[in-house]
Image (spheres, coloured by chain):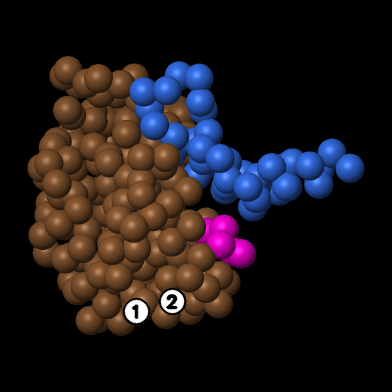
Chain colours: A brown, B blue
Amino acid sequence: MIIEVKDVSKAYDGKTVLKNFSLNIEDEHNYIITGKEGSGKTTLLRLILGLEKPDSGKVGLLGDYKYPYINAGVVFQQDRLCEGFSAVDNCAMVSKKVFRETVREELLKLLPSEKLDIPVSKLNKAERRMVCIARACCIPSDVLIMDEPFDGLESDDVKKAVSFVKDKRGSGSLVIAAKDTSQLDFGRIIDLSL
Amino acid sequence: MSNRLKELLEMASVYRMPKSRVIRYIYIPEIISMLKGNRK
């Protein structure tokens, strides 16, 4: 499957964020979208997910794909966790195909066991981000789309999370938007500031 | 619509399995309680 982003332009309140931008996202490839604040990283991810419509150009699927929509595991820029629920519950709720024991095993790769069953409102910023990453990776998906997934993580945690995400990508594709790419040397870097 | 509700609805829509044309959103209890709250 290839996600085709073709000649896409998008503006908000008269300010152009993306102009005639094109990119093909292919299976088994990693893409690191970078650029300064307001360069269109989040907008690009939202266009790929169908949460925004481009002003011009198109986002579509090329080749033989079984579904009319992209099957994606997503980390949003904001955590978007259900605050009163535990890490396990937050991850298990995104798919009926996910078993709680599997979720627990995956979460244990990122968080200590005592953090898994308490409400996520009691976790710190880095721990909450880890839950978001695990949630995105828990479901079977064809593409992982992550907006600043490692924001607020210490260097060692970034390493742990990157290794987890790369392992979970499988044969799909991985698209990460990040301002800081210093520890993200495993994919094609696309700088939207240029 | 509040920002929080909008964020959760977006999350619920991207996480629904794409093979389902009927189910457009996954079930997130907070969305239901927010919608009920709005109706009061």
**In contact (CB < 8 Å): disc 1 and disc 2:** yes
Decide: is A63 above or below A97.
Answer: above
Relative to A122, A75 lies left or right:
left
Circle 1 — which element? loop
Residue A134 percent across, percent down from the top left: 33, 59
Camera sees residue A176: yes
Residue B15 in the figure: left or right of residue A14? left
**Which quadrant does the C terminus of chain B fall into?**
top right
Q: Chain of mark 1?
A: A
Left or right, A4 with reference to A70: left
Would residue A132 be found to the left or right of residue A63 on screen?
right
Number of other residues with Cα within 10 Å of mark 2, as a class: few under 14, some 14 to 19, many 20 or more: some
Quadrant of the image occupied by residue A3:
top left
Q: Amino acid at mark 2?
A: Lys
Q: Is residue A88 above or below residue A95?
A: below
Task: Identify the magenta region.
Answer: A81-85
**Figure quadrant of the N terminus of chain B:** top right
Residue where numbered disc 1 is placed:
A112
Which SS does the magenta portion mostly show?
loop
Tell me where residue A90 appears, x and y as whole percent: 48, 57
> Is A23 inside the magenta-drawn segment?
no
Subunit that carries the residue with mark 2: A
Q: Pointer 2: what residue?
A: A115
> At x 21% / y 73%, what residue is drawn?
A160
Amino acid type at image mark 1: Pro
Report the Cα–Cα distance between label 1 and label 2: 6 Å
- Reply above or below: A109 against A169: below
